[in-house]
């Protein structure tokens, strides 16, 4: 069945109702929290895409100035890669029901994420000390905006991380929900890692 025929259906008519009643109505086997996370990541991805398009479009104006890339950005990128890897190891440990090791990797991932956020704040401080203010040039404003949005989404993820950490102290020996929650955190961090790498590459190339 083509997409046009699906869109042209009229479910409120009696003829279409008879056709719909013959459908088996099989539901999705994917857990609802995972579906919700995918929807959230889609919205975040669209948001960053729109800002990136606006960033590239604004470069065409003559008043655009190139913002220098502090070396600390490279170090911060390494930290967030390590954080994502720690979440990956936590996911593996949770599937093996090794809750102690899972908790250790979760603490490491959270600490590295806080290190990345702190590093980004130091980058802002360094740029401001050299006179690169938000109001000085549109390119500077875009840099602060995009990095601030990324930090905000990481902070939102840390709230979920705290809940998973809390649950790791109260769960039973067998807890599939805990393993799912760890995996969802890992997926979210992998996603934000990709977002940051794309933003960083865009800043470097422009």
Image (tube, rainbow, N blue to C red):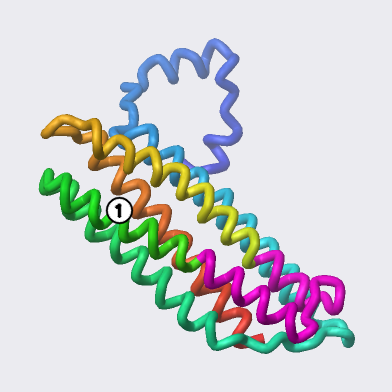
Is 53 left or right of 172, judged from the image as shown?
right
Rendered image quadrant of residue 160? top left
Q: Whole-percent x and y of residue 96?
A: 11, 48
Q: Whole-percent x and y of residue 101?
A: 17, 53
| Above-or-below relation of 84 to 61 | above
Q: Which residues are magenta?
A: 117-146
Q: Main secondary structure of the magenta part?
A: helix
Which residue corresponds to the image point at 38% horizontal and 56% vertical from the top-left? 110
Q: Report the front residue among 43 and 105.
A: 105
| Above-or-below relation of 88 to 182 | below
Q: Whole-percent x and y of residue 67?
A: 71, 85
Is 60 left or right of 28, judged from the image as shown?
right
Q: Whole-percent x and y of residue 181?
A: 32, 41
Q: Which residue is mark 1?
A: 106
Rendered image quadrant of residue 26? top left
Point out the image quarter for the C terminus.
bottom right
Q: Report the front residue among 102 and 92.
A: 102
- Label 1 environment density (alpha carbons within 10 Å; few <14, some 14–19, many ≥20): many
Which residue corresponds to the image point at 70% horizontal and 69% vertical from the top-left? 144
| Above-or-below relation of 183 to 168 | below
Q: How many numbered marks are there?
A: 1
| Above-or-below relation of 142 to 132 | above
Within the magenta stretch, is there residue 88?
no
Query: Judging from the image, what secondary structure is the residue with disc 1 in?
Result: helix
């Amino acid at each position: 069945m083509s997409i046009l025929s699906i869109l042209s259906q009229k479910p409120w008519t009696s003829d279409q109702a008879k056709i719909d009643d013959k459908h088996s109505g099989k539901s999705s086997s994917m857990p609802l929290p995972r579906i919700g996370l995918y929807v959230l990541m889609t919205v975040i991805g669209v948001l960053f895409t729109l800002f990136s398009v606006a960033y590239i479009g604004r470069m065409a104006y003559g008043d655009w100035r190139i913002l220098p890339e502090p070396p600390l950005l490279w170090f911060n990128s390494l930290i967030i890669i390590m954080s994502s890897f720690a979440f990956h190891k936590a996911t593996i440990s949770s599937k093996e029901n090794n809750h102690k090791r899972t908790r250790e990797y979760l603490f490491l991932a959270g600490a590295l994420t806080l290190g990345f956020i702190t590093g980004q704040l130091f980058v802002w401080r360094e740029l401001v000390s050299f006179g690169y203010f938000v109001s000085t040039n549109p390119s500077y404003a875009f840099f602060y905006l995009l990095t601030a949005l990324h930090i905000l989404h990481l902070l939102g993820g840390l709230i979920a991380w705290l809940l998973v950490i809390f649950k790791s102290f109260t769960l039973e020996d067998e807890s599939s929900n805990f393993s799912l929650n760890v995996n969802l955190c890992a997926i979210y961090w992998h996603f934000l890692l990709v977002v940051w790498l794309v933003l960083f590459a865009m800043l470097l190339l422009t």
